[in-house]
Amino acid sequence: MAAPNRRRFTITDAMILVAGAAVGLSGMRALYAGWLWPPPAYPGHFGDWALVGPPTCVVAALAVTILLLNVRRPRPRWRRLVIRPGVIACAATVAGILLGWGHSLLFKTLVAGGRSQSFTWVGGGFEWSAAARDVPEFVMGAWLALWLSGRWSPDPTWIDRTGRVVGVFWIAGFAWRLTGPIVTQFVLWL
């Protein structure tokens, strides 16, 4: 049996990841101009800031970057590539963001009734949060489908592990949305 194609971490990969993080940071700065650092000072909102706020811009940009890095050679066959949990998490992130934006745009169009004068821009951070709201469900659904079909096949490479970290970030944001209000009642500094 031939050894699988495993791509080592190179300087080019590092440069591409840094560029992706830079795109995410610039998007975060543009969308959340007045809400970056320090996080909101009042109790109960640090978790919101960290898991469902501005850092989601960086994670989404890194998801796109990881998808692009996965298609660089050497890579496994496409059939093998699309059953990796890291690739699935990044693809679900991109699909969730795009569908969230499409949903937001459709809703605004229906509310505006097709009249361009009543179509207003609420604000970048709000628009981004609305688009990113459903990404955790996309990631969990994709991972659940992969697991239930018996195709869950994690690869012990840096790139698949990084993609899985992206997926875990979104799931942690979902868990925080469910448990955060309860936890902040008991731990005021979160």
Image: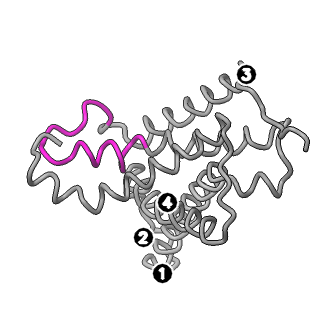
The answer to which quarter of the image holds residue 62 is: top right
Q: Amino acid at mark 4?
A: Val
Q: Helix, strand, or loop for circle 3?
A: loop
Residue identified by numbered label 3: 10
**Residue 168 x, y percent position in the rendering:** 47, 49
Q: Is residue 16 left or right of residue 136?
A: right
Whole-angstrom CA distance, mark 3 to mark 1, is 51 Å
Classify 10 Å Cα crowding around label 4: few (below 14), some (14-19), many (20 and above). many
Q: Is residue 14 left or right of residue 46?
A: right
Q: Helix, strand, or loop for circle 4?
A: helix
Residue identified by numbered label 4: 135
Q: Which residues are magenta?
A: 36-55
Which of the pair 107/23 is nearer the observer?
Answer: 23
Ranked by sequence position, the earlier of labels 3 and 4 is 3
Ranked by sequence position, the earlier of labels 1 and 4 is 1
Whole-angstrom CA distance, mark 2 to mark 3, is 50 Å
